[in-house]
Amino acid sequence: MASVQIKKRKSNIELLRIFAILLIIINHLSLHTPWNVEKTANVARLTTQWLASGGRLGVNIFVLITGYFLIKSRFKWRSLSKLWLQVWLYAVALFFVFRAMGEPISYNQLRISFLPIFYNQWWFITAYVIMYLFVPFINKFILSLTKKELRRFLGLTLIVGSIWPTLAPKISIYSDVTWMIFVYIIGAYIRIYPEDFNKIKTRTILIYFSMIGILSVCSIQLMNWFNSLPANFLVKLIRSIGISNTRLANAPMSPLSLSLAVLILLIFLRLHIPYSKFINTLAANVFGVYLLQSNTISHKWLWRVVNAQQFTDAWQILTYAILITIIIFSVGSLIVWLTNFIVKPLEELIFGSFDNYQQANIKIKE
């Protein structure tokens, strides 16, 4: 009998998934904490705003990875169904757990918990599922274009869908799904045309990354300073545009965040990390960790317990945020690992018989 070798996935991209979820957790900590810092151009406030900028960066990284892999893969209803089942199980389980803990839960929350994707329990999951449904058509569109046409399309989309609405935020041309599709196509481009990026030296990528990172921090601090100015005619005129303190660095469609995400992906693609069971196992828990800490019921309880607002010094805020993020990821990974003893058998029970039916049909046709 011919032996079948199971291809083990290298751990560089799996490590990137872990890095991305850490960015998202630290973003949620910053966003949901009522910080007791002065609303001026001070280091403590800048630290909280800088931590908050990691959320969209992490999301962009996840979608880039999706485009990078799915452009070479087939659409699978089974994958989508497994995702739907896992999301539903987590939503319902968290509802009952926190209901038992005495957390106030409204009728609206009951509806959202039992139809989590339909009612946007996790905005990222809902947008991702919608994007995934269109992946076969997106891939056909990508592959139908020449390299020159695809580059022109991405350039035009970058201007219209990223730069323009970032600088003029009252232009309503943004949605989570359309943004995901754009970032997906960038990830696909990196996979299809690696020669465009392989010729760039790693040192150059690191320099670009440093420059854009510094520019992001400076843009936040510049807006902090600007918003502290007396409201004269010129200041009022510029403020009327609608650019907030962190918009350039943290807006959903920020070109700075997108650029950093692309550069980070290129850096991790160059890391020569062989298969690591430990890294890949942790990376497999990333999705479950996201569901646990981003749930609309659990996150209120979680950040209340974390109580990060007790710190007002920049170094204390940064140190505590990093420590708490590692703890949340570690505990969340343990919970996901334990829940897999329930989720995996359910998946096998539901999808195993369907797989057997498919295999039987294939043998009959052969």
Image (cartoon, helix red, strand yellow):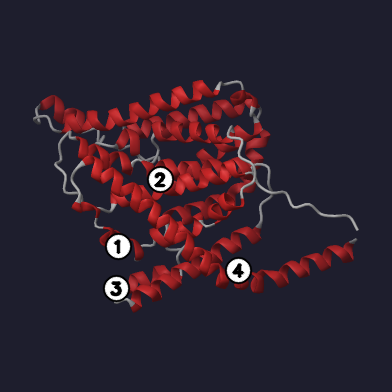
Residue under pointer 1 = 300
Label pair 1/3, CB-CB below 8 angstroms: yes
Residue 287 image offset from top left, x and y in percent: 50, 56
Label drawn at residue 344: 4
Badge 3 marks a residue whose secondary structure is: loop
Q: Which mark is residue 49?
A: none
The mark lying in front, picked from 3 and 2, is 2
Residue 225 in view (yes/no): yes
Proximity of marks 3 and 4: CB atoms separated by less than 8 Å: no
Upstream in the sequence, badge 1 or badge 2?
A: 2
Decide which of 88, 38 is in the foreground and name it: 38
Q: Please, what is the three-letter code of the amino acid marked with disc 4?
A: Lys
Q: What SS does tag 4 mark?
A: helix
Image location of residue 35, percent across then percent down: 20, 49
Which residue is depicted at the point 83% across and 68% down? Answer: 360
Q: Which mark is residue 103?
A: 3
Q: Earlier in the sequence, mark 4 or mark 1?
A: 1
Determine crowd level at label 3: few under 14, some 14-19, many 20+ residues with C-alpha closer than 10 A: some
